[in-house]
Image (cartoon, rainbow, N blue to C red):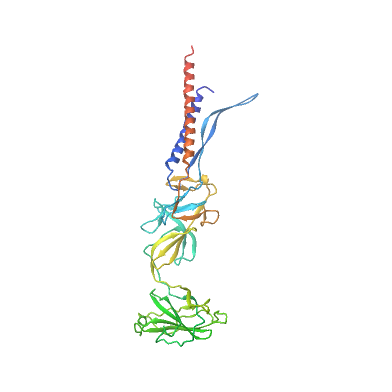
Amino acid sequence: MSITSSFFSGLSGLDTHATAMQVIGDNISNIHTTGYKSSSVHFEDVLGVSLTGVEGSNQTGAGASIASVDLNFIQGSLETTDVGTDVAINGRGFFIVEDPGTEEKFYTRAGHFTIDADGYYVDSQGHRVQGYLYDPMGKSLLETLGDIQINRNSMLPPHITSEVEMVLNLNASESVKVWDIGDPAASSHYSTALTVYDSLGQSHLIQVYFTKTADLTWEWHALIDGGEVVGGTPGVPVLYGEGTLGFDEEGKLTTAMPVDLLTEAITFIGGITPPATKIDFTSTTQFGSASAIQKISQDGYAAGNVTGVSIDEKGNILAHYTNGMLRAIARLVLADFTNLNGLERVGGALYRATTKSGEALFNKPGDGGVGTISSSMLEESNVDLASEFIKMIIIQRGYQANSKVISTTDEMLAQLMNIR
């Protein structure tokens, strides 16, 4: 090889080190980019001449080239944002977003998502976040990828009260009384209130009175204000339902449950039929201590509008309603790949699947080896600034050394030209 070949070796060294410096600069400039993954440059040698002689081979290199620029997918630190729609992945996986125009899918670790004017869950570039959608009742998950949309103007329909659970203790030491609807407070030993909802989501207050009528026997009477029923008088209670509770000598309830709460033929104002509600007194006791309510619950609710959303660690997106209810809208889906370094970086913290990366493997958060979801958090860049500065010094020295090769070769050629 001629001496001029060292020019090209030095030039290749300058090119590779310049590329390495470009990668380092890119890493440092993205030190605060959400979900950014740092890159590393790997060099390889270039074989120039391979001559085989009697005594063996003579192989001469021709410089260096870039073997690959690999991404470092080590997880970055998670930063709290207090923004309910921000999400981060704790573990492996990528969020899936889709361009609504081309329907092309991209993958990202940057979870700074918002809800646009049409209710779609989108990234900063308008790509729609993908997930599995729940049915309209928020019960069954339909495992087909689709756009996640939250309609803030939607209304959750009301639900009638079909079940009431009430657990209380009734004081066994009370004396026997005779129930009188004309004076319910004086003719009972204890009372508590509950609310029931009709088919329109209207609430109705029911007062339940408990009266000891014999040893180990109590009666309950549910009353409603006459102003809420057809033919009633405001301020005058109307019987809504009644029943008997029997107990054994250990104070445990023996009456079969549940029973009907509504036992009377009444109609609410407006022609609405009261709901056919079952009331369950299971676990109610009769001990020798003060009467007290321990638990009361019912499954009805009024209509409600969306007030906000939240996301749990399993990626479920929950809509919060003004009536206090929660309903599952969708569940985030995470993608994983057999070869992460085969992903194509396309900018905007997005990646595209390639033949080298393999097809995306879709899983629910926490399943199939993918991570869980941390809401109101974002993943920071995984760039190690100290490491990048050290690499910068090393690359700079390498660049200087290759420059020296070129200048030295130039001096050698000058000396050759001066030979007479």
- Which residue is at the far right? 55
Residue 384 rendering spot, x and y as whole percentages: 48, 42
In the displayed structure, would residue 356 be above or below residue 129? above
Q: Determine which quarter of the picture holds residue 128.
A: bottom left
Pick the residue in front: 145 or 169: 169
Q: Is residue 57 left or right of residue 349?
A: right
Residue 137 rendering spot, x and y as whole percentages: 45, 67
Residue located at (48% from left, 48% from top): 77
Q: Quadrant of the N terminus?
A: top right
Residue located at (39% from left, 70% from top): 303
Residue 318 rendering spot, x and y as whole percentages: 44, 62
Residue located at (55% from left, 53% from top): 369
In the displayed structure, would residue 411 be above or below residue 39? above
- Which residue is at the far top? 420
Residue 367 rendering spot, x and y as whole percentages: 54, 57
| Count of number-bearing discs | 0
In the displayed structure, would residue 139 be above or below residue 107? below
